[in-house]
Image (cartoon, rainbow, N blue to C red):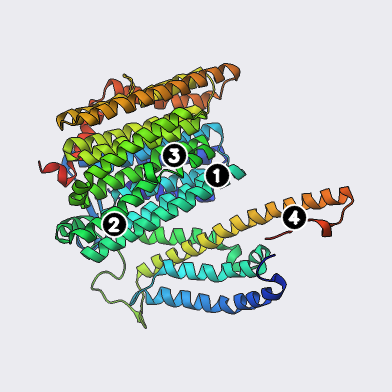
Amino acid sequence: MPALNPQKHAGMLQSGARIILLPSWVIAIAIMLKGYADVGDGFSAGVIAALGVLLQGLAFGTDELEQITLSRIAPILSFVGLGLALLTAFVPILFGENLFTHWPGINEHAVHFGVLEFITPVVFDIGVFLIVYGFCVGGLHAIAREEVRQVRLRDRGRYLRSTTRGGSLADESGEVRL
Amino acid sequence: MIAVPIAVLWFGGFVLAVLDGTRKPAAWLSVAVLTSAILSTMALGITVYQDGPMSLAVGGWSLGVGITLRVDMLSIVFALLSQGVLLAALIYEVVNGVGARIYPAVVLFMGLGLTGLVFTGDAFNFYVFFEISMISAYVLVSYGESPRQFRAAFVFITVNLLGSVFFLIGISAIYHTTGFLDMYRIRDQMPLVQENPAILSATIIFVAFSIKLGLFPFHFWLPAVYTGTRPSVAAILSGALANIGTYGLIRFGADIFPRELRQAAPVLIALGTASIIYGAIQALSRHATNEVLAYSAIGQVGYILIALGIGGPAGYAAAVLYTVLNSTNKALLFLSGSLRGWLAGAAFAIGAFSVAGVPPASGFLGKMALFQVGIAEDRPMLVALIFLGGALSFVYMFQLYRRRTAEIEAHGSSPWGAQVVVVMLALVILGIGVWPDPLLNLVERAALSLPEAQVP
């Protein structure tokens, strides 16, 4: 017997997961923005945002991840992120500048919005955020989907065997645990 | 100039990620991208060979402020080695038919990681590129998607994530004690650091690279993974990815921690000896081709460790030389080991002789270099060990070869394309053995780019 009764505790986990989704994104974005004045960057922000979404899958099952737009488009997001990061790194070369040269340049005036400076490294960081987010959600989702598919195949086989033997599913000793 | 190979691989990987790699045009495009990366690395290598090390601070920051890319001969040798092995494995897979659409893109990303980490002059950036290549490796190991491959992937990922964490802790420790992440600055600062923290950081980093390399006490994950994956993936793991471990040990050991490396020399030699003997005895007792090769890989890295332990220009040159020969040998053996047909059999025989150290296959060069170092340093035990290790490797490679020939008679022949790829690789190995001067010269220059080798 599992220590937790799934029927009784799923509600708590599910409502907790729902409540935490929006705050996790707010915190992720805050961490990304404050990275320009304080500890934090796109990488850690991506991990936190991904955890918020993956928690939905944990609470509601992998089918839920297929429903949420943010997880469906995760692979595309990581691809877009890689593109953004690459462009900020290599486009300066086309203008005869050094790799990763940013604009506005060193000692030049940049527009501020609170602690956020509007400089091209912010685009790079958004790219990193998208790569990390997309890779975490997309990768774990793919693994979970495969796992669930195999479990379902196995259960279907068991069900077919038990019905052909004339037994009922209630006698089945191999309990289905996801 | 320095950034060209990295840019080529990065954009190539980016484009191939959207294309379907199972289709021939996309697969050959990836081969073209990797080839142009190799050509640009060679062009860079010629410049470095003539004019000495180059560096570039990104973002137009002054040197010492921005993150630097730094290329010397050691970087060039390792970059070309890894890219070459990747190219052989990629062509092999393309000719045999790529099984997964993402495979070519992932190989390019691994090339990017392996090139980037030898080109960077920044310890944290080293970690970033290191992780790019490790993540590609995680994807490659699970490529194939049978339960057996999935299990191998799980072991591989768990152990190597642990290794990465060790490395990250080591980098943080260095940053904490020296206040720098730039390798040159760390090197200048390191002698001022107290002995105990320095030894601790050096040990953590040594453990991290030993796990990657599959050195004796940290080898336990390696046989399961090498036997569980496809031949081209096993070739990539042992011929390209393992270079991270060797390069890391040489770069961090001889460049950043020379004092600690000297202190630890007896330990390195003891571990190397254990690795050689353990790997050879295990390889003797195994039957499956990939298993024998996996244990042989554990044994062969022992020689590299011993060369590092001896140190000095000759010792480092022997370590680099042995790495080059070992990587090409392992790539050839893993690729040709699963093929049938007389061409593949001949290629396998050349690889087997090379590991055993029989001329003219190039493997004897590495053994000879170590032998010379052992005699010059007046270490009779070492010379005896090289003889013993060589004899054991001769026996297990011969056993393996005999079993293979028996199997070939029972089966048909593999596609000609794949056989031609392994024959080309075998010819390279033979060529190096017959005309070793260019490689020896390169390796010597690579060892001289380490500061410790310049001081007598």
Q: Earlier in the sequence, mark 1 or mark 3?
A: 1
Residue visible at 39% across and 65% down?
A124
Please name which of the two marks, 4 or 2, marks the residue nearer to the observer: 4
Is the same chain shared between marks 4 and 1? Answer: no
Q: Does label 1 or label 2 sit earlier along the sequence?
A: 2
| Residue occupied by mark 2 | B123
> What percent of the width, then of the height, locates residue B358?
33, 20
Q: Numbered disc 3: what chain?
A: B
Q: Inspect this view and state whether residue B347 appears.
A: no
Q: Quick one: B221 or B143, which is closer to the camera?
A: B221
In which quadrant of the rendered view does residue A34 lie? bottom left
Q: Is residue B156 above or below residue A47?
A: above
Please rate how many residues cluster around mark 2, counting C-alpha atoms within 10 Å: few if below 14, some from 14 to 19, many from 20. Answer: many
Q: Amino acid at mark 4?
A: Gly
Kindly indicate whether the residues beneath marks 4 and 2 are on one polypeptide chain. Answer: no
**Image quadrant for the C terminus of chain A?**
bottom right
Give the secondary structure at mark 4: loop
The residue wearing badge 1 is B143
- 3D distance between C-alphas at marks 1 and 2: 30 Å
Residues tagged 1 and 3 counted as in contact (Cβ below 8 A): no
Residue under pointer 3: B236
The mark nearer the N terminus, 3 or 2, is: 2
Disc on res. A174: 4
Residue type indicated by callout 3: Ile
Same chain for mark 3 and mark 2? The answer is yes
What is the x, y in percent for residue B226? 48, 39
